[in-house]
Image: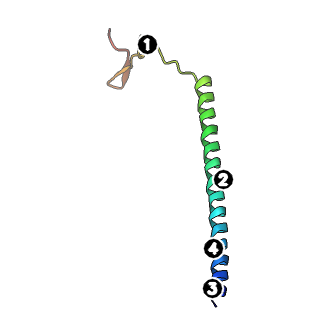
């Protein structure tokens, strides 16, 4: 009777060990996948940094003056 219990317990332990090993494998694979995604995104950001124009308009640029509307007649603003 004791021997049967020990055999069942050993089988249960082996099953649990296999489940833990499989779960660990899945977690590690998931981590590798996430790391690959992160590395790919980093490469894409570096590529975009190199290819995108980062220049802005010079600060001396002046906006085009708006026309004033008086009595339905459009006229340029007086300077």
Spatial CA distance of label 2 from label 3 is 36 Å
Of pointers 1 and 2, the one earlier in the residue sequence: 2
For marks 1 and 2, give the one nearer the viewer.
Answer: 2
Cβ atoms under marks 4 and 2 closer than 8 Å? no
For marks 1 and 3, give the one nearer the viewer.
Answer: 3
The residue at which mark 3 appears reads as 5
Locate residue 36: give its quadrant: top right
Of pointers 4 and 2, the one earlier in the residue sequence: 4
- Helix, strand or loop status at disc 3: helix
Cβ atoms under marks 2 and 3 closer than 8 Å? no
Q: Which mark is residue 13?
A: 4
Label 1 Cα crowd, 10 Å radius (few <14 / some 14-19 / many 20+)? few
Of pointers 1 and 4, the one earlier in the residue sequence: 4
Quadrant containing the N terminus in the rendered view: bottom right
Percent position of residue 45, x then y: 59, 32
Locate residue 23: give its quadrant: bottom right
Q: Residue at x 60, y 29 (%)?
A: 46
Q: Residue at x 61, y 23 (%)?
A: 50
- Helix, strand or loop status at disc 2: helix
- Helix, strand or loop status at disc 1: loop
**Along the viewing direction, whichever of 25 and 61 lies nearer the viewer:** 25
Of pointers 1 and 3, the one earlier in the residue sequence: 3
Chosen colour scheme: rainbow
Percent position of residue 32, x then y: 64, 48
**Along the viewing direction, whichever of 60 and 33 lies nearer the viewer:** 33
Q: Is residue 79 left or right of residue 48?
A: left
**Along the viewing direction, whichever of 67 and 43 lies nearer the viewer:** 43
Cβ atoms under marks 3 and 4 closer than 8 Å? no
The residue at which mark 2 appears reads as 29
Q: Which mark is residue 61?
A: 1
């Amino acid at each position: 009777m004791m021997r049967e219990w020990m055999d069942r317990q050993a089988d249960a332990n082996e099953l649990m060990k296999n489940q833990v090993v499989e779960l660990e494998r899945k977690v590690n694979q998931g981590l590798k996948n996430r790391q690959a995604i992160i590395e790919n995104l980093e490469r894409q950001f570096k590529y975009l940094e190199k290819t995108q124009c980062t220049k802005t308009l010079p600060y001396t640029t002046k906006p085009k003056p708006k026309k004033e509307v008086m009595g339905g007649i459009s006229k340029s603003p007086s300077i």
